[in-house]
Image (cartoon, rainbow, N blue to C red):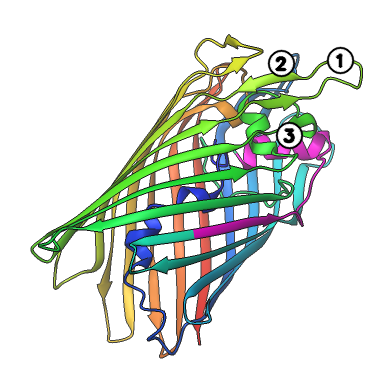
Amino acid sequence: MRRMISPWSQGIVASVFVLSPIAVTAQKSTSKITTGIIVERTTFTGGVLESDLAGVDSTRVLSATNLAVPLQYSTVLAGVWLLDAGASFTSGTRKVAGTSASDDALSGIGDIRVRASRRFDGMGLRITLGANIPTGVTKLDRSQTAALSVLGSPAINMTQPAVGFGAGATLGVVKSFASASKQWGVALGTSVEWRGQYDPFAALAVGAAVNSYDPGEVVRLSAGATRLFGESKGLITASLDLFGADKVSRGTNTAPVKIQIGPTVALDAQFMPATTKLKNAALFGALRLRSALKRDGTELANSGNVMFEAGARAAKPLTSRVDAVFEVSGRVLTAVAIDNRLATAASTSVAPIVGLAINGADWTLQPMLTARIGGVDTGIGKSSFTVLGGRLMLERRF
């Protein structure tokens, strides 16, 4: 369910609070490039059973590995437009028990995502335009689909594989308000996403064949508020996603199946305490509730799900140029009980992250060690799992 709505739409209201301090007309260094390498390996204790998409066979998954190379660029155009674009290359495999065949693999370059936003200070408005350029891998074969079920599983939460979604676009508008005392800031927003003719993550999340899935549009209504508590700051956002009908093709002579994804409500909160000993300290939490699916107008039992996550992050200065960075979070995800795949499985996990931020005059280098430890339940099998990884990210500003 990670990609039921595009990352561009997800950030429409939150971007008001993150981006509004940027005075783009007054900055000289307004561009940056971020890239790096991310490596992850997941192991399941004793393996975990998952079914195939048809539910007629099961496979014991032992492990999965993934390598990702993301690239992100942002700049200011004409002094008023904030433009960012990103893509990534990933290469992942899943290993199963009892076979001498090669591992299921999924590799390739993902779509290029482009977003442009502009703030109109006099009206308190921010407009965001987004586009998905279809450069990624599409039309997955059976082995690639099997790999995607593990690599793209929200229960494990590895780096998202680089697959294609077809051409798409997003339009968002946010109106912000400030109180007379400047202690409160409020924003209301809406966005609409036109999704392409292909969405493998959404297909797996509703138990459909990935190559026959035609997603509908998504409308998002959002509200956010931020408040100062002395020198500390609190932020809360809420959103409601409304999905158009998706279609699953069944051949040229048969009418497609209509899938209606239930409305999704999400709440996100952060508290950033003022402290002289730590930098960028924050407590955060997120809650997402999605109602049941409907297939050709009939509600599917137990097809809704809930996700809750909470944690803390901060950086501790070690020298004038080096900070120690740490984060820890816990996560609970209930199953989408329509099949027995890792793509729809339930999980409980904790994720510690430790690393460094090495700061130069116009660059930042971040070596990090990451982990996720927990348990997963596909409905036909349970297992504890461990995701161990490392990442080396470089940001260059100019």
Where residue 123 is drawn, which disc sits there? none
Q: What count of labels does the image hold? A: 3
The CA distance from mark 2 to mark 1 is 22 Å
Q: Residue at x 40, y 48 (%)?
A: 189
Image quarter hosting the N terminus: top right
The amino acid pointed to by label 2 is: Gly
User: Which mark identifies residue 55?
Assistant: 2
Left or right position of 390 against 315: right
Q: Quadrant of residue 368?
A: bottom left
Foreground of the two, 213 or 339: 213
C-beta proximity under 8 Å, tags 2 and 1: no
Determine which residue is flagged by label 3. 146
Lower position in the chain sequence, tag 2 or tag 1: 2
Task: Provide residue 213's location: percent of width, then percent of height.
Answer: 74, 31
Which of 77 and 227 lies nearest the eye of the viewer?
77
Q: In the image, what residue type sits under mark 3?
A: Ala
Q: Could you classify mark 2 by the number of other residues whose Cα lies within 10 Å: few (under 14), some (14-19), or many (20 or more)?
A: few
Q: Amino acid at mark 1?
A: Thr
> Residue farthest to the right?
253
Q: Which mark is drawn over residue 254?
A: 1
Residue 132 seen in the figure: yes
Magenta stretch bounds: 128-152
3 or 2: tag closer to the N-terminus: 2
Q: Position of residue 173 (x, y in %)?
A: 45, 53
- In this picture, residue 267 sits left or right of residue 208: left
**In terms of depth relative to the viewer, which is nearer, 299 or 66?**
299
